[in-house]
Image (spheres, rainbow, N blue to C red):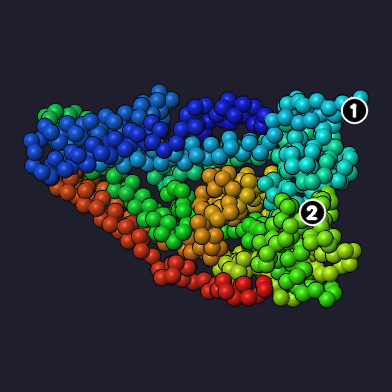
Amino acid sequence: MTALRTDPTADRKAIAPPSILRTGWRLPEVRWASIALVLFLVGWGLQLAGTPAWMWWTAYLVCYATGGWEPALAGLRALRERTLDVDLLMIVAAIAAAAIGQVFDGALLIVIFATSGALEVVVTQRTAQSVTALLGLAPEQATRLDPDGSTHTVECADLVVGDRILVRPGERVGADGVVIDGYSEVDQQAVTGESVPVARGVGDEVLSGTVNGTGALTVRVERAASESVIARIVALVEEASQSKAATQLFIDRVEQVYSFTVVAATLLVLGIPLLFGSPFEEALLRAIVFMIVASPCAVVLSTMPPLLASIANAGRHGVLVKSAAVMESIGRTTLVAFDKTGTLTEGRPEVAAIRSLGERSPAEILAAAAAVERLSEHPLGRAIVDAADTPIGAVDDFRAMPGRGVTGLVDGRRVTVERAGDQANGTPENGDHATVVRVTIDGRAEGLIELVDRVRDEAAGAVRDLADITAGPTIMVTGDHTTTARMVAERTGIAEVHAELLPEDKATVVADRRRAGEIVLLVGDGINDAPALVTADTGVAMGGRGSDLALDTADVIMVRDDLHAIAALIRLSRKARRYVIANLTIAATVIVTLVTWDLVGTLPLPLAVAGHEGSTVVVALNGARLLRSSVWSPSGQPAASAPRRSDSAARSRSA
């Protein structure tokens, strides 16, 4: 993966070379693989149609050139570094096949490898792009306060520890620092995952890239731009992505030994008969047959069809797995870790209950609060407006009270909505951690509105399923407060909680568990989860609300945000692994049989090709059986999962 600069104030186009910015058809690897596939299909069609041999031979040979030049070049570079890989072996096998008239077999081999390489490049480029996009969170300029009280606009990269910056309402904080004057609420969800803006006053820490609310803050810079939380997220994502690139399928892990063995054996099959006086043509034919039957076509197809069929199966049920290597590794999971906000919870506040303190009805209290909050951009205010189903009147003299709430005149009455605190146990009806706001009309407290970030209905059942599958507890890693995190953990059955974590801390927790021998699958949705997602053995992103970075750096995307799908995915991966082992057994048996026949007797070329291609077809069809699997129920829910409560029931509970 191309290295990315971690200076968040650098020119965006200088952060990554132009190749990083190309995707899809613009990638040369994708173009060459696509052209090779088209040429292969054209050649096959001409061959089946009975056209003159030179026509379909030409199509196949051009397919060789378009799809094989890059693996051949990579193989030659590997040889120059005194290594031998399967890519070069495939090219040699394809050329050998064409040399004895089996040009179809060689072209098929070329197409398989070209397509696989193109898919890998696409995933790599998209991840690099998403990391680059993350740097957009960091502002490029800040307002610096000089000792004489004057202000100057400066580049964030020029700020040094000890500088004072002014952060106006609605601006992004220009550097990691500590508030030395002012009071406001700061939206930190992109960095810490907290669903509700947090109050920040003198002595409190603020982070680069977070969004200031309605108050003005004076901040003393504590870290340079290159050491900010945003910059560290970029560095962690890149570092973990590079370390994960070493994870390969079984065939890749043994390619050196297999390649050297086949090449050495082919040379022996050619050379030994020549030493004993055999004709060159006869020895060459035997060596070519050996190369064909020993080539790992069936071995390659032993792994890919089951895994690709599993990927297609999961995709039909709303779970997108990005590669065969990911599908293979999911089944080995021993520990599942969850983010909280937007993963175990819905990720957005909503009105859970309204309590009247006077003569006004709950509907009147909600309508008055919504009228004032209509002009506010605070998440709690938006939730109140969304919950109101009565017409909202005009507001005069609207004022925001930083860190407290809003106030305004509604039909001549002064309506004030201000935060009254948190209620750790929530209401008896919902059991969630509640944020309480007080509605005051003309100086008299008229009611309380409770808002919650509701725990997903399926969360507890999904956690139980995963504990059964992995035979161990699940854990939570979150940037939210410890009290809130423990409340959600208690409701979902999670025994171990790591709270108030920065993104790098989440990645550290995951890395520590991996070093302890656990195979970690992490589920998250935010930018703050990205380092942990790529540090984990498998990263799973919630597709409904997931940030672009989380979606691009994760290995798996759950389009329907259904937590039950994780357990089903692990079962599907384990089933695919069993199919892979069965296919490898079949492929190895056929290869050993044909190779032995060729060495101790005379294996006819047609029989060699038939046996080789027959085993390839068998393992491919066996893997394709996973296109249909019993891990999913007809409705699309995992078969072993508990049913979810209906949406209508959920709505009635929150009414």
Secondary element under disc 2, as helix, strand or loop, is strand
Describe residue 479's horizontal placement relative to residue 625 as left or right: right
Describe residue 395's horizontal placement relative to residue 291 as left or right: right
Q: Nearer the viewer, residue 585 or 86?
A: 86
Residue 396 bears which disc, if any? Answer: 2
Q: Nearer the viewer, residue 251 or 290?
A: 251
The residues tagged by marks 1 and 2 sit, at their Cα atoms, a distance apart of 35 Å
Q: Nearer the viewer, residue 186 or 473?
A: 186
Residue, x 22% and y 42% (percent of image)?
41
Disc 2 residue type (three-letter) = Asp
User: What is the x, y in percent for residue 336?
Assistant: 60, 58
Extreme residue toward the front, this view: 412
Describe residue 311's horizontal placement relative to residue 517 as left or right: left
Please identify the quarter of the rendering in which residue 170 is found: top right
Of pointers 1 and 2, the one earlier in the residue sequence:
1
Above or below, comparing residue 451 to residue 379 in the picture: below
Above or below, comparing residue 396 to residue 173 in the picture: below
Residue, x 90% and y 63% (percent of image)?
443
Residue, x 79% and y 54% (percent of image)?
396
Could you tell me if residue 349 is visible in this image? no
Extreme residue toward the right, this view: 148
Specify the quadrant that holds the C terminus. Answer: bottom right
Q: Nearer the viewer, residue 38 or 501?
A: 38
User: What is the x, y in percent for residue 17?
Assistant: 52, 26
Above or below, comparing residue 553 to residue 366 in the picture: above
User: What is the x, y in percent for residue 469?
Assistant: 54, 66
Disc 1 residue type (three-letter) = Gly
Please identify the quarter of the rendering in which residue 311 is found: bottom left
Report which residue position mark 1 lands on: 149
